[in-house]
Amino acid sequence: MLALVLDDAEMNNLVMVASLRPLAGCVPHAFTVPAEALAFAEARAGDIGIVITDYEMPGMNGVEFIRAVRRIPGLAAVPTVMVTSHDQRSLRREALEAGATDFLTKPADAVEIRARVTNLLALSEAHRAQRDHAAQLAREVAAAVALVEEREREIVSTLMRAAEHRDSDTGDHIARVSAYVGLIAEAMGLSAADIRQISLAATMHDVGKIAVPDAILLKPGALTPEERREMEKHADRGRRILGGSESPVMRLAAEIAGSHHERWDGAGYPHGLKGEAIPQAGRIVAVADVFDALTTERPYKQAWSPERARAFLQENAGSHFDPSVVEAFLSRWTAVQAFLTLGRDDTASATQAA
């Protein structure tokens, strides 16, 4: 473990280094210029176990040096000793506030130096071990979370493959909606973890359609009022299919399934929720879902141009859609166009274009 020693007097450095050399595992490096000592500290921060600095030095005193050391990543908690001939309480208080751990008074006795440094190196080693243990725990937690997320993706993939047997467009549709949802969530300032979660959950927004009869789900023409009512049941059915899980993703997916057909003005279904009473995730998926439906050819209609669909979103912001969600979606319009240009089969490239 390295001991960084700083004193503008070369003789003082020689005495300090000679006192430290007998300590097992302690390798002292002495400097007379603060700037050079700081450059060394930045380059070897992970190896430094203790910093020992004089107070009175030209250009930068010991307190200023300690403050500079504390700002170096990895050295915020390294034991730091101030060596001074002064016995002033105000100076010690200032040094403590700057981050000093201990003090040595000139002329320092070699036995005292070794005793204090030995104790502080043990403290430094304990702190390093604790830091390494915390880092290991963080890695293990991250690995466990990644495994859970992978299992959730497998479950979702299996569920969606079942849905694809009912509707040949389902797989492409859910991939596109998921990509649009990711763009919107990013524009609205959601965290990276939340963006991943809502993008995955959004893939299950229409899972309730597996309970819709083929005669209605695959009908090429307009639905009758009775058929429309049966089709609209897919929202609540999806919520029930996905509900009751302990998984945050599945709970979010259930919320989306049950709310992505609600309207901002309260005229939607299944519960006629209005404004912010509609879950945010449902409001986000509503915009993505409708935009994709408009720009995709279906048995009963031709695909709209992206510009026409964009105008529809703008015209219906505040009635059908949450205005803030529409604004977020349109703020990523370049990425949306890139996605459409790519044939809407490369969600990763479109997202990176945002």
Image (cartoon, rainbow, N blue to C red):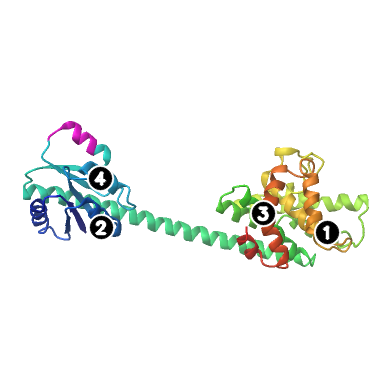
Identity of the residue drawn at 9% across and 47% down: 112
| Magenta-highlighted residues | 87-95
Three-letter code, disc 2: Phe
Residue 146 in the magenta stretch? The answer is no
Residue 319 showing in the rendered view: yes
Instruction: Answer with left or right where residue 293 lies relative to residue 196.
Output: right
> What is the crowding at mark 4: few (fewer than 14 residues within 10 Å), some, or many (at least 20)?
many
Amino acid type at image mark 1? Trp
First in sequence, mark 2 or 4: give its number.
2
Picture residue at 25% right of the left edge, 52% below the top: 35
Question: Could you tell me residue 345's position as x and y percent?
Answer: 70, 67
**To which residue does mark 1 refer?**
304
Q: Is residue 220 above or below residue 252?
A: below
Disc 2 designates what residue? 40
Q: Dot 4 corresponds to which residue?
A: 66
| Mark 4 to mark 3 CA distance (whole Å) | 47 Å
Q: Are marks 2 and 3 in contact (CB under 8 Å)?
A: no
